Image (spheres, rainbow, N blue to C red):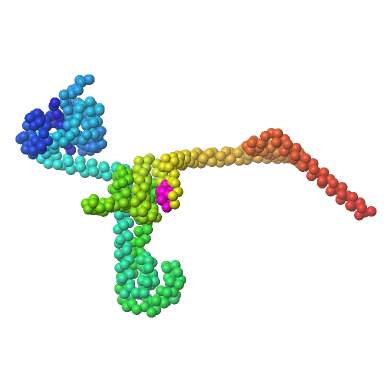
Amino acid sequence: MALFLLYESASGYALFEAHGLDEIGQNTEAVRNSVSDLNRFGKVVKLRSFNPFTSALDALKQCNAVSEGILTDELRTVLETNLPKVKEGKKGKFSVGVSDPKIGSQISEVTKIPCQSNEFVSELLRGVRLHFDTFVGDLKSGDLEKAQLGLGHSYSRAKVKFNVNRVDNMVIQAIFLLDTLDKDINSFSMRVREWYSWHFPELVKIVNDNYLYAKVSKYIEDKAKLTEEKIPGLTDIVGDEDKAKEIVEAAKASMGQDLSPVDLINVQQFAQRVMDLSEYRKNLYDYLVAKMNDIAPNLASLIGEVVGARLISHAGSLTNLAKCPSSTLQILGAEKALFRALKTRGNTPKYGLIFHSSFIGRASAKNKGRMARYLANKCSIASRIDCFSERGTTVFGEKLREQVEERLDFYDKGVAPRKNIDVMQSAIESAENKDTEMETEVPAEVSGKKAKKKKQKAAAEEGDDMAVDKPTKVTNGDAVEDHKSEKKKKKKEKRKLGQELEHDDQDDGANGVVSEQDGTAKKKNKKDNNEVVEAGEESKKKKKKSKKKDNE
């Protein structure tokens, strides 16, 4: 069977034909030895066709397609024009050797050309790559190197620029910087303490916090100038008036040496730098929390933003973390201990970076390994949901956290936890409910706007009616004007009564009131009115009788 080799170079597609494979016997060792020798390899492999790329942009397009396993139209035409044609319903008496199995399977699916990719073919393609400039005579010296360099730069630039999965790079850099800042701020704070203690050694025992110490030393400056007038300012910094008074009293009887103004200025500047670094560390932590809630919300809500970011940075990316099994995730960060245990045949570690989670600390000593295994299982699920789900939501992370809490109670108190299938079902339902709420919020706003427009229209119509109802001036006399105005007033009152009755009817219909109940209610109202009228008449009669008696 004839063997053809497809080689994708930086300058174009090349198709080679391999001869004399029966003599070699398809022995990989023999091919490997003959590759370095051009005379022997040139007898076995011959160039069949070479199709150069039209431009650097075309080369980048073809390279991207081949790397993703996509068959382009250009590569298909090259294969169909230069390879022997296969009759329908029959197998070809040749095969094409390719370097990537993905592109080979795509070629065989689309064009029905048989392809193979194995160690023997890869050794032949290595020889082709080694002697490619001698096979293609039209290439000048240095042309192939320039094409490879340009294509490599553009391909790498495009991968870095358009790779959506590398957004977690920001989280990786932020957590690295956060750890570095913690170390640096700690060492710088110790340097401030040691430096300023030459001047005011008693302050170290009073103020324990590093950030507060730098702030207090910046505020005090020279201890000789520290008086009771500065107690309010010290109280604002320290947060305790007794501590502020203690600092002032200690300054009066301090055993420290005096510093020159230049030395004090340097100490104050360094303290200010430590304070700035501490403020920047707080801002960086807020940024990390925001990014983790965007990239991996479920993992962050389950295990915390900092531990989740450390897991992502150690794995390399969120995709790599999602691909890790839970057993690997459990010991991420404890590789040295693992390999040492395997070498010495000791006990393997139970946990790595997830030890910093609060769940492991809350578990008892005998249940820490169980808890680490269970937590790693849930972290693996959360990372896969974050990596492959289309919409970001924290519902699954919260439910997984509830499961871990229930497992802790189970280990401590023996309370049976819920089944995983029930918890996941409730999580899916709550996520769907959230999506429907988000979808219904927009139509509600639209209906509110429509109602406002209707109200505005109704107000405008009422204004027009009022404008029509305004009486016009008549010059025929005051009596005619009074008569017409009385008529119009009556009409207005009738309209108002009609509108009020319609409004009442609408309200009753909306509240589901039956017409019979309306009738009974109206009768009751009439009876009540009659009773009120009768009571008023009786009171009047009594008053008249009392007046008559007084007159008599």
Is residue 522 one of those drawn in magenta?
A: no
User: Dividing the picture into quarters, in which one does residue 11 lie?
Assistant: top left
For residue 384, side relative to residue 116 (left or right): right
Residue 413: where, in percent of width, then height? 44, 52
Residue located at (36% from left, 71% from top): 204
**Main structural element of the magenta stretch: helix, strand or loop?**
helix
Residue located at (6% from left, 34% from top): 40
- Viewer-side residue, 209 vs 284: 209
For residue 521, side relative to residue 105 (left or right): right
For residue 29, side relative to residue 267 (left or right): left
427 over 243 or under it: above or below: above
Residue located at (32% from left, 62% from top): 185
Residue located at (36% from left, 55% from top): 365
Magenta stretch bounds? 402-412
Residue 125: where, in percent of width, then height? 14, 35
For residue 254, side relative to residue 76 (left or right): right
Is residue 409 one of those drawn in magenta?
A: yes
- Viewer-side residue, 76 vs 435: 435
Residue 269: in sight, yes or no?
Answer: no
Residue 316: where, in percent of width, then height? 28, 48
